[in-house]
Amino acid sequence: MHQHAKLAFTAILSALLAACGGGSPGTSIAPPAMTPPPAAGPGTDVSTYKNDLNRSGQNLTETTLTLANVAPASFGLLRNLAVDGKVDAQPLYVSHFSIAGASHNVLYAATEHDSVYAFDSDSGATLWQVSLLGSAETTSDAHGCGQVTPEIGITATPVIDRSAGVHGTIYVVAMTKDSAGNYHQRLHALDLASGAELLNGPAEIAATYPTSGGGTSTFDPGQYEERAALLLLNGSVYTSWTSHCDNQPYMGWIIAYAESSLIRGAVLNVAPNSGGKGPAIWMSGGGPAADAAGNIYLLTANGVFDTTLDANGFPSGQDYGNSFLKISTAGGAMSVADYFALSNTVAESAVDEDLGSGGALLLPDLTDATGTVRHLMVGAGKDGNIYIVDRDSMGKFSASSNNIYQQVNAAVPSGVWSTPAYFNGYVYYADSGATLKAFALAGAKLSAAPKSQSTAQFAYPGSAPSVSANGTSNAIVWAHENVSPAVLHAYDAGNLGHEIYNSNQAANNRDHFGAGNKYITPTVADGKVFVGTTVSVAVFGLLQ
């Protein structure tokens, strides 16, 4: 067995789920008062990183939280749900979900201690908890790297398919270490209602890929970490892999599995001939994005880029360091369909100034000044520039210039370690140690300077904002500040100079929720805001 389950909510629930392995419930830091059950009617699911495959970070169906009631007098910390390790993955949420015949709004949280929790988001009760550690296994050590410490378990944001299996399925990648010192990366498919392992899982992550001269590269689970969020696209779960710091050897693996069987599908390596010098794929926890045609988009980190190009303008060695990538999934295979690499990509990689510290955002269709509909992708990394790439013609590589749709120089001068958010013609970025900024789109071009920005400055690594709104009204930008104690900020999306709430405002530290954690994106759904910490998930909402 690669899991054990502890299922509890009521005696009825325990009895009905006994076949999945009953046990004692988890605990909350502060047991909440009785809370009414979820109201009837539709709710909002947050089933993937940043809400959708564009990675926009926007929830446009938020009818409870408004610019008027998100204020210290009426909004604050409701409870802090205790877990057994760091919550580096974005919490996910499923509304009006039936467990043992009762409806719950369910929060799913994954930890670096290799546990997955399901909480009733209204009462704080633990509905189930499972450990993804195998027999005599532990979580992975940090591999001498300070990026994920003190243990590596579940780092990447999982993905949920409510229609998969009997009750719905959550897909999770967990890293473990066995008693012989061997490392494992496994893809788990867990039943949404119980946490039970499905599909005869988990699947051991394993792959090979051809290299030049007839050789083969082999995926080594100990050399990699799944940091970037999982992508569920057209029946496949896509995993993408980063190194432990820059500990060589490592390559740019993307490995797909069928969501209905956990059978491995397509494999792509975007650094097969790099000699183990990268690039990797991490995007500070951001997830690969996807368009309606089934193309995948991501940003690679520092590493080898072959400046010698083939007849079609692609790197001769198929090594794509510091690049925007468009990956085709046609015919069940993966291949690089187009790309953009910086003209100074080799120089930036040499000083660890990688583009891939930032995540990909696909903008909605925009019409430019000539009436042409543009399909655009936005990305930024450590060099302080924002790059806007035309997904229909990305620009490839030229040593003399960046042949792309638009480049906004020094727009985020402190560097980006996050995925931006989009709402109603604005792109929101918070660079490291600097302000949260709103850049406007007009004529399918991004403004050279922010139209508004926060007063607060966000310590390293900046912030990965999200947006809640009711259509286009009551739009709020939510941003997490990585300090101790951590701070949740809420801003008027139309004017970031207007902060409507932060968790330091209430008297007697009422809304303090623990130490800060990197790369945290607030999850907003059905009147609540969920924020991962080093030991819990904080739940904010309207005060009773």
Image (cartoon, rainbow, N blue to C red):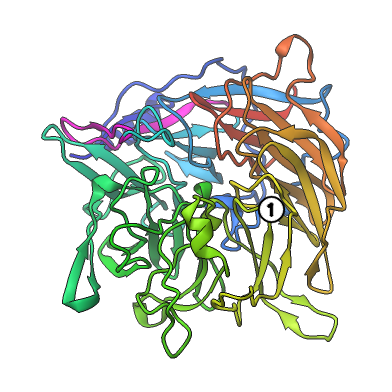
What is the x, y in percent for residue 210? Answer: 23, 73
The residue closer to the viewer here, 528 or 158, is 158
The residue shown at (64%, 47%) is: 415
Q: Quadrant of residue 445?
A: bottom right
Q: Is residue 160 left or right of residue 383?
A: left
How busy is the neighbourhood of tag 1: few (under 14 within 10 Å), some, or many (20 plus)?
many
State the residue position of label 1.
Answer: 421
Amino acid type shown at disc 1: Ala
What is the x, y in percent for residue 351? Answer: 50, 50
Q: Quadrant of residue 440?
A: bottom right
The residue closer to the viewer here, 149 or 30, is 149
- Looking at the image, which residue sits at the far top? 508
What is the x, y in percent for residue 315? Answer: 42, 77
Please name the predominant secondary structure of the magenta segment in the image.
Answer: loop
Q: Is residue 498 above or below residue 418?
A: above
The residue stretch that appears in magenta: 123-143
Count the labels in the image.
1
**Quadrant containing the N terminus in the rendered view:** top left
The residue shown at (67%, 52%) is: 384
